[in-house]
């Protein structure tokens, strides 16, 4: 199978657009003196989880990081008091990452800045094509899994 030039062009545009939007979101968070986007992803995943806690192997796919990368990220978020680790009673080797009250408060502080950046740098340019883009990216995600 040969890759069509249009498909390769679309791939490059996708990668560059993703990098540019993430960079703008990171900049907006930094300018507001807030933690980086990866922290938001961890806090949001825990906020949505039952009992606001997840094992590392449950958290990793939600933040798109390797297990070792996730452990280092959670270490930093924990040092800031936004999550804490809780021993897993059924598996002595395992632990949960648990959202703290400070973590939930930080999530609430970060969201307006994140939302505004998504609106400005993603939603506005996509416009009425949002559903078609979501459908296309869903097909890509399904094919990759």
Image: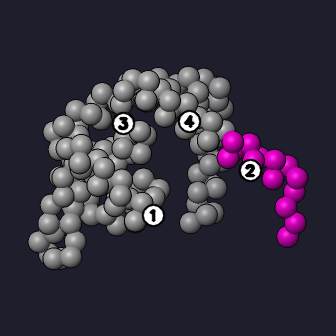
- x 30%, y 27%: residue: 109
142 vs 80, nearest the viewer: 80
Secondary structure of residue under mark 2: helix
Write down the residue under mark 2.
11
Frontmost of labels 1 and 2 is 1
Residue extent of the magenta highlight:
1-16
**Percent position of residue 59, x then y:** 34, 58
What numbered label is drawn on residue 23?
Answer: 4
| C-beta proximity under 8 Å, tags 3 and 4 | no
Q: Count residues near mark 4 (Cα–Cα under 10 Å), then give few for <14, some for 14-19, many for 20+.
A: few
**Total marks in image:** 4
Task: For marks 3 and 1, give the CA distance.
Answer: 20 Å
**Percent position of residue 105, x then y:** 22, 32
Mark closer to the chain start, 1 or 2: 2
Mark closer to the chain start, 3 or 1: 3
Write down the residue under mark 3.
35
Q: Count residues near mark 3 (Cα–Cα under 10 Å), then give few for <14, some for 14-19, many for 20+.
A: some
Task: For marks 2 and 4, give the CA distance.
Answer: 18 Å
- x 60%, y 23%: residue: 124
Mark closer to the chain start, 2 or 4: 2
Q: Quadrant of the N terminus?
A: bottom right
Frontmost of labels 3 and 1 is 3
Tell me how the rendering is colored: one colour
| Relative vertical location of residue 142 with respect to residue 114 in this rendering, above or below | below
Instruction: Determine if residue 128 is in view.
Output: no
Is 133 included in the stretch rendered in magenta?
A: no
What numbered label is drawn on residue 66?
Answer: 1
- x 45%, y 58%: residue: 65
Task: For marks 3 and 2, give the CA distance.
Answer: 29 Å
- x 16%, y 77%: residue: 92
Mark closer to the chain start, 3 or 2: 2
């Amino acid at each position: 199978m040969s890759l069509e030039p249009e498909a390769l062009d679309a791939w490059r545009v996708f990668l560059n657009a993703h990098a540019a939007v993430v960079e703008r979101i990171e900049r907006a968070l930094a300018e507001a003196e807030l933690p980086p986007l990866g922290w938001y992803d961890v806090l949001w995943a825990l906020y949505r989880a039952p009992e606001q806690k997840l094992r590392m192997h449950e958290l990793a796919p939600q933040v798109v990081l390797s297990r070792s990368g996730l452990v280092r990220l959670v270490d930093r978020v924990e040092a800031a008091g936004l999550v804490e680790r809780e021993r897993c009673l059924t598996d002595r080797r395992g632990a949960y990452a648990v959202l703290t009250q400070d973590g939930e408060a930080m999530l609430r502080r970060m969201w307006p800045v994140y939302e505004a950046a998504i609106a400005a740098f993603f939603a506005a340019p996509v416009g009425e094509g949002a559903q078609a883009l979501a459908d296309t990216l869903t097909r890509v995600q399904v094919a990759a899994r």
